[in-house]
Image (cartoon, rainbow, N blue to C red):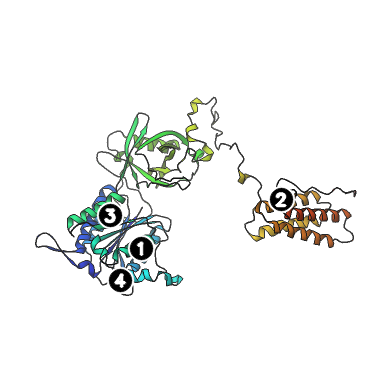
Amino acid sequence: MPTVILMDVSLSMTRPVSLDGSDEFQRKNLAVHGLNMLFEHMASNYRLEFTSLMAFSSLWELLVPFTRDYNALQEALGNLEDYDKTCVESALNGVSSVVQQEWGSACPCQVVLVTDGSLGIGKGSLRQSLQSLKHRADDKKFPLPFPFPTKMFIMSIANAEELQATDAMNNLEELLHLSGGDGQIFTMEGPLCMKSVQAMFGRLIDHAYSPFHAVLHCGNLSSDVQVFPRPEPIVMDEEVDPMPRSINPDLELVGFIEIADISSPPVISRHLVLPINVNKEVDEVGTGATDELEEEPSASQMAGKNPNFCVLLHGSLKVEGMVALVQLGPEWYGMLYSQADSKKKSNLMMSLFEPGSEPLPWLGKITHLGPISEAAENPYGEDDSKSPFPLQPSVKRSYAQNVTVWIKASGLQTDVQKILRNARKLPDKTQTFYKELNRLRKAALAFGFWELLKGVADLLERECTLLPDSAHPDAAFQLSHAAQQLKLASTGDSQYAAFDHNIAPMHTDFSS
């Protein structure tokens, strides 16, 4: 999940702050100190994170494009210049442009806005931007919410009392709400000093940038791993009392399966799994952004000289073309697999399925899967020429049946025209005529579309009056009979509007 650091360099950030002793610092110096602390943490624990640095006042500027070079980010922080008034809306437009140009609109992104809480003055101020939300033209809409999934964290170089003395806190809360509400406002506690800003950025790190450590188990083998990015708790909407569900730090491998059998399953998120060793080396993975990187360590280098189960598992899955099913918690599963990043590089990935005992219907319940050795005969055949998957459902699914659906008016028109075409070819098309008529009748009854039945009945009566003199006598009888039955069904009377009832052809003395 890439991160955009949005640094306020307006004049209000140059206001002095009296620290212990005779030294005087600006609020900007406190912000730079906190960001350096964040970058040092990410360099040690989040080296795979792509981070960009932007500065803004009345205009915005991209100081460092998305990179993993945290030295470049810290160097840019040391060269910040001071500019004019604050204009948050312009800066947010810049964030939207930079992120979409690099990652598109599908990649989630974290935005860290560092400001002193000053809203700006006059046109372009945050106060004026929020007040004019409902009076904007379509081409001048406020940039929030972003077109991509976002978590916004607002780091205020001010304490809560200072923000609440004006309407700054209310406006920042409204800004957070417009972004989607999936974020947080952090304020400094106590006096404005280095210790307070360290504590504030420490809370941000604990909340959004703490690594997820887990233990991968398979029988008697285990390995300490780091999962990147950190898996977020999920809430199932269909539950009566939805509660956030989090991944268990003890990941248990429950079995292995062919890639062809699992195919491309639906997943809720994908994560990189890295082995943890004494040297704390972290593998580098290219994700599409242009960046200068040092030579990447191999899997054996990652694990050092000590045997590592995670490296063994990765190599085995890659060579055998299989995936490992892993239990993430009670009735919650995922899969581990090798994904090639380039011709010479591959990574151990983990995808999370939807919680439940049967996340992939074609496999059945995960708990019902077992080793091939316990089967009466090899389900794959002696020469691997067949597969036991997908499992055939015991009940025929509704979407597998011939159900009439009218999404557009053209679909309904086509069905009515089909009935009329067959009506003009009676009695030769008697069976087809009644088949299409009953199909339309059932659909109309299911939808409560009584007017359709009455309308089609009127059309059939009209067709009856337009029959040529050369028409077979049976045609007029069949059309009148069908029209009468549709009119009776359109009344809603249970005697004639039964869903399972079919209109049968009228028996006549005429020969075909």
Please report whichever mark, 3 or 2, sits nearer to the chain's N-terminal start. 3
Looking at marks 3 and 1 on the same chain, the residue that comes earlier in the sequence is marked by: 3
Residue displayed at 85% across by 54% down: 477
Secondary element at image label 1 = helix
Residue tagged 4: 58
Residue at numbered disc 2: 439
Q: CA distance from mark 3 to mark 1?
A: 34 Å
Q: State whether residue 289 appears in this view.
A: no
Q: Give the foreground label among 4 and 2.
A: 2
* Picture layout, residue 374 above or below residue 224: above
Provide residue 454's location: percent of width, then percent of height.
Answer: 74, 58
Q: How far is disc 4 from disc 1 in space, using C-alphas?
A: 20 Å
| The quadrant where residue 151 appears | bottom left
The local secondary structure at tag 4 comes to: loop
What kind of residue is marked 1?
Answer: Glu
Answer yes or no: is residue 435 visible.
yes
Local crowd at mark 3 within 10 Å, few (<14), some, or many (≥20)? many
- Sequence-first tag of 4 and 1: 4
Which of marks 3 and 4 precedes in the sequence? 4
Which dot marks residue 174? Answer: 1
Q: CA distance from mark 2 to mark 1?
A: 54 Å
Q: Label 3: which residue? A: 69
Which of the two discs, 3 and 1, sits closer to the camera?
A: 1
Q: SS class of the residue under badge 3?
A: loop
Query: How many C-alpha atoms fall within 10 Å of the one at disc 2: few (<14), some, or many (≥20)?
Result: some
Left or right, residue 40 beside residue 130 = left
Residue 356 position within the rendered picture, expressed as x and y whole percent measured from the top left: 47, 40
